[in-house]
Image (cartoon, rainbow, N blue to C red):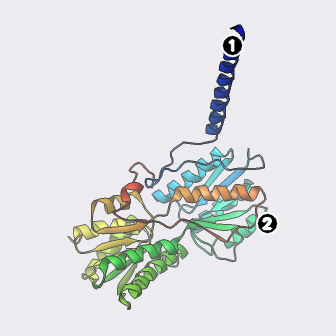
Amino acid sequence: MKTKNLKTTRMKVIRSLMVFVLISTLLGCVEHLDTSNTSVNGEDETTEIYESAIDLTGKKIGYCTPSLNAPYYQALLQSIKTTTEKNGMVFLSADGQDDISKQIAAVEDLITKGVDALLLNPKDPDALVGITKIAKAAGIPVFIIDSSINPSAEFVTTIQSNNLANGELAGAWLAKKMGTKQMNIALLSGNAGNPVGKTRKQGLLQGITEEQLRTQGKINLNVKTQAYTEWSYAGGLKAMEDILVAHPDINVVITESDVCVLGAIKAIEQAGKTDDILIVAGADGQKEAIKYIMETDFYGCTAMNSPVQIGRNAVKYAIQYMNGKRDFEKKSFTTPLLITKENAAKYYNPSALF
């Protein structure tokens, strides 16, 4: 009887130890998961801890933004900062203040501070080529994010949303929506010569024409005017006011970015034309735009350009470079995604920075 009780006691102890080990193992795994919510546009983004064979403690990630005058830039900076610090590194930032000379000086300052990787969002594709060569001479890898740079620059890779594919998705959606109805299109752009804007515009027009050819066997593309907004609410408002005077028959507005058209909506509303004009954006998935898509019929769709995901990818690639990786593609894209009334609620987060 005593032997039986002893065996029972031993079995209970063994089971307890097994449970303890299992719980400890699970808790050990949980320690490596970061549940801090850096949600953007309704996405449940969690900061990732990336694998590294080297000790990242004290490594410096430098980021230079062209400006902080837009929610997108603020959200992108916050994503890079959070991801950098969660991976045990030091974050250094610099603001170009919407001025090329100031951005060049800001990048020079980061180089002087001895950053281990430089993340650069160029205001101009040509003006910052020289500074990338200075960085390389100092042994600092440069990662271009969000925007683009002249191919003659010294950089590891460009990290951005797939602007061409996103534009194509939005353009195809518009062509399907309008069918054979005549489109009198106004195009709202960011600023002249911007490579990202040009690619988005190309995608939009390509998406429209390819869908028309596929379904109608012909192209009916009538872009009556283009206006530059300088990527701003005020610029979009002024541009749309002028367009409605010069082209009162406009019934479609296509744009390279949500921010270009959010101000334009005020002009459209004041003119009483929200029932007559359909808006389609090639980017970005800004929360204000998603709200319009959910609540109105005049804002048809936009495409996702997630600053959170771009920021996370940029830091991940910098860590990979520090660990010896060199075989990067020259362009690295996030996954294309179209936001319409059918899925807008999934991506809407009123408390998001962007």
Q: Residue at x 48, y 78 (%)?
A: 203
Residue at the spot x=68%, y=44% of the render? 88
Under mark 1, the amino acid is Lys
Give me the residue at 72% from left, 53% from top.
113
> 207 or 191: nearer the eye?
207
Q: Secondary structure at mark 1?
A: helix
Counting every numbered tag in the picture gives 2
Q: Quadrant of residue 229?
A: bottom left
Q: Residue at x 67, y 11 (%)?
A: 5
Q: Which residue is mark 2?
A: 137
Which sits in the foreground, 104 or 197?
Answer: 197
Quick check: 173 left or right of 182?
right
- Which of the two discs, 2 and 1, labels the residue nearer the N terminus? 1
Query: Image check: 324 left or right of 294?
Result: right
Q: Quadrant of residue 8?
A: top right
Q: Which mark is in front, 2 or 1?
A: 1
- Is residue 112 shown left or right of residue 225? right
Q: Position of residue 200 (x, y in %)?
A: 48, 75
- Tell me the quarter of the image containing the C terminus: bottom left
Q: Which mark is residue 4?
A: 1
Q: Nearer the viewer, residue 285 or 10?
A: 10
Residue 168, how many percent across, how many down?
46, 76
Residue 109 visible in the shown view: no
Q: Residues within 10 Å of mark 2 (few under 14, many from 20)?
A: few
